[in-house]
Every structure is written in C-alpha cells, then in structure tokens.
Image (cartoon, rainbow, N blue to C red):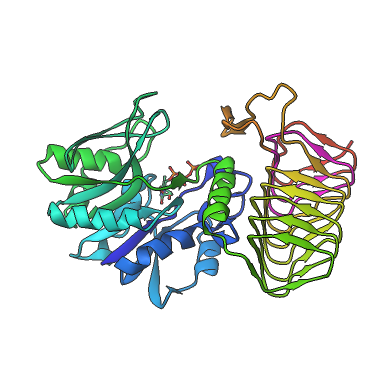
Amino acid sequence: MKGVILAAGKGERLRPLTDDRPKVILKVANKPIIEYVLENLDPFVDEFVVIVRYKKEKLIEVLGDEFNGKPITYVDQLPGEGTAKAIESAKEHVGEEEFIVVNGDIYFDVEAIKELISVFRRENADAALVVKEFDDLSHFGMVETEGSLVKAVREKPGKVRGYANLGIYAFKPIVFDFIEKTNLSERGEYEITDTLNLMIEGGKKVACAVYDGYWNDIGRPWNLLELNEYILKNKLKHDVRGTVEEGAVLIPPVEVGEGTVIRSGAYIIGPVKIGRNSRIGPNCFIRPYTSIGDNCHVGNAVEVKNSIIMDNSNAPHLNYVGDSIIGENSNLGAGTITANLRHDRGNIKVEIKGKLEDSGRHKLGAIIGHGVKTGINVSIYPGRKIGSGSLIGPGVVVDKNVPAGTLVIL
Ligand code: TTP
C-alpha cells in the first residue's frame, strides 16, 4: 500500500516562516514536521508519494529520495487548488491499489493510522477517515456519523461539540471517479470533503475511525509552539552527546547533540532540546520547552523560554526570547528583547492573512523569519512578525509586522 502525503500548500497563514519554504519542512523539536508523518506511515506502506508544488525544491532537498529504506516519489500537483486536486495528482502512482492519504502538516500518533486501516478493512469501505471529538468545532469541518459510518461532512458548524475531520484518510481507487465530479467550493478549492459527500450520496461506503490521542494541525505560528511543547514534554529523553563544562547545570530531560558545547554558568531546565555544533553560554538561562537547532549560538546573559530557535541562528548577548520562533540564519543584536505578555494580560492577537486573529494565548512573543538581523536594543511587541531577510536597525521598537526584505531604521 502507498502512503500519499499532501505537501503542496502555500502555508500562507504561517508567514513569515514559509516565505521561502513549504511549511512541512519547518522543524519542530529539531525535526521537519513531515518526518513525523512519514514515521507514522512507515509501518503500513511500501512507498511514499509526496504531492508538491510550492517551493518543492526545498522539500526534495530536505527529504531526499527515500525514508527508512523506502522510496519517496514526488508528484507535482495538477493545476488547481485544494486537497481533492492534490489527491487526484497521485492517481497514476497508486494504480489499482487502496492507499492512505495524510495532510503533511499535521502531527498525531501512529494509533490513528492503525485504527483507520482496521475500520477501513472491517467495513470493507470505499473510503475512511479519522475523526476526533472536540468541544468546539468552530475551526473544523464536522463529521456526522452513525456507528462506524459517515453520514455527511459539514462546513464549520460553529461552537458545537462533535467529530472533526483530522486530515487522515484511506481510499479505494473509486475515489478518483468522484474527485472528477467534485466542483469548486466557495473557497475556490477542490476539497476532498466535498468528494466524500459525493461518495456517500452515490451510495459508496465511507467509514470513520475515532481517535482520542494528541493531534495538531500546523496552520498558524503558535501551533508550532504548542507542538514543540507537546513533543518535548512527552517524547524527550535525557541524552547528552556534546561537551558540558564544569559549572553548567542541566536539569533533565535535556538533549544535547554531538559537537555542541555547553559552557560554564549555563542553567538549563528541561525539557530542552539542543541540536549539533551549537554554542551555549557561558552564563545563560534556558527554560523548559525550548528547542535550539544546529549551529546556533545562545550566549552570555541570554534567557530563552518556550521558544523555537531554528538552525544557524543566534541570540548571542543580552537577549530575552520568550514564547517566540526564530527562523534559520537569523541573528539578534545585543539587547534585542521580545515582549511576550500584554500589560492587560489579554490574549495576544496576530495578523494572519490580513486579519487579526486571537491566538488564544496570553503569552506569545515574536515570530521572526529566516535570515533576519536585528541591531542592538531592538524591542519587539508580542505577536509581531518580522519577514524573512529583513534588517531592523538599532533601537527600533517593532510594534507592527515587518514585511519580508524590509530595512527598518529609526
Ligand atoms: P491547508 O492547511 O488548508 O493549506 P495550506 O497548506 O496551503 O496553508 P494555508 O491555508 O495557510 O495557505 O492544507 C491542508 C493540507 O493539504 C496541507 O497538508 C497542504 C495540503 N494541500 C495541498 O497539498 N494542495 C493544495 O492545493 C492545498 C490547498 C493544500
């Protein structure tokens, strides 16, 4: 059986982190999101088919042509938007076999796939999907069920309790006949949920597997922080491969990669994950739920908490990085500080595709893209985004989002 992974999306809600790369290669706990999906599919499939389009070269460079000894085939998405279009793109590659489809930007446990296959086979269904019960379905499509069968998939029904569609499916090839009949949705996309409704109306059997484990859909920047926290809290093992100088304190679990040096006076409270060849300290404070990538520098008098610092980035002197994400190849000038809390303790709102959205968090710092440089004493308001390749001059107060490639000076 083949595993099809949808990874062609533009990830616009995740700007600036997706300015120059597809979202599925963003690293959480120092691993590209799509690798967690591949790991979960691995026990059940003999080949991975990855549907690509936006910045596909970067994805291919990161994943290569095999995973765990199994081939990865990259397939360009057919013209048109949406998950149904993405799945249709795999038609020739899956042939007459049944196959699994997973959105490349979600995190879940392997149980979800086990349950999916078991229900799909038991019901001898034409399609199956994984659902999870939520108290509030405002952000999800609702799956109406009867026992193990699906009656309909509805648009976001508002604040009601019910089953959400998690973006994990199994199909028989008959699905392609129904994808052909699927019309553009109001959003201007060909959506697989519409295809599923057509299948049900056409008398086909669509089954559902109920999953109650952890699941996260990486749509918005703060989802990366939530997922980082979950993985570090639940999966991290204390494992120190680098060098730890006398006078550094590591409270487990802390993972330190090969070639990394933790200098004297560093105080690290796990769970914290640090990649390879990074320099940490002397005299810094790294607090729980922090991931620091490869070739990073966190230097003297720097505090980092609940944050993601991606590869080749530095917070070298006198920085506070709280509840923030820093992309690759970025550098904070001495004294650059992120604010992560409003004085009124209200939820931090973030502009997503031109609209202010409530992040649901009262602590959220900066979202800094790739290749950003800040000067000395830059202050960044909570929930502000700095676009990739921007340069922020000394003493600037970043109280508005900064588009990619901008020079901001006082
Ligand atoms: P979305 O998260 O709905 O879309 P997106 O990834 O483009 O993100 P944004 O809305 O922020 O721009 O996509 C769900 C999954 O489907 C995701 O894994 C990407 C994939 N996808 C495709 O492969 N092709 C497509 O045309 C679309 C719309 C999504």
Q: What's drawn in magenta, residue-wise?
A: 365-392
Q: Which residue is at the front of the view, 208 or 97?
A: 208
Residue at the extreme left: 203
Q: Residue at x 16, y 53 (%)?
A: 174
Q: Name the quadrant of the N terminus.
A: bottom left
Residue occupying the point 22% across, 54% down:
171
Q: Quadrant of residue 350?
A: top right
Looking at the image, the residue that sits furthest to the bottom is: 69
Q: Is residue 326 left or right of residue 226?
A: right
Q: Nearer the viewer, residue 195 or 361?
A: 361
Q: Is residue 64 magenta?
A: no
Residue 378 lies in the magenta-colored region: yes
**Residue 132 placement (x, y as % from top left):** 34, 41
Q: Position of residue 47 (x, y in %)?
A: 33, 70
Q: Is residue 281 left or right of residue 226?
A: right
Residue at 60 percent across and 33 percent down: it is 361
| Principal secondary structure, stretch drawn in magenta | loop
Image location (x, y in percent) of residue 140:
38, 34
User: Is residue 182 among what the camera can see?
Assistant: no
- Please state the horizontal and vertical placement of residue 245, each as a whole percent of the image: 82, 70
For residue 68, above or below residue 9: below
**Extreme-top residue of the structure:** 344
Relative vertical location of residue 376 with respect to residue 238 in this rendering, above or below: above
Apparent side of residue 296 relative to residue 215 in the rendered image (left or right):
right
Q: Is residue 217 visible?
A: yes
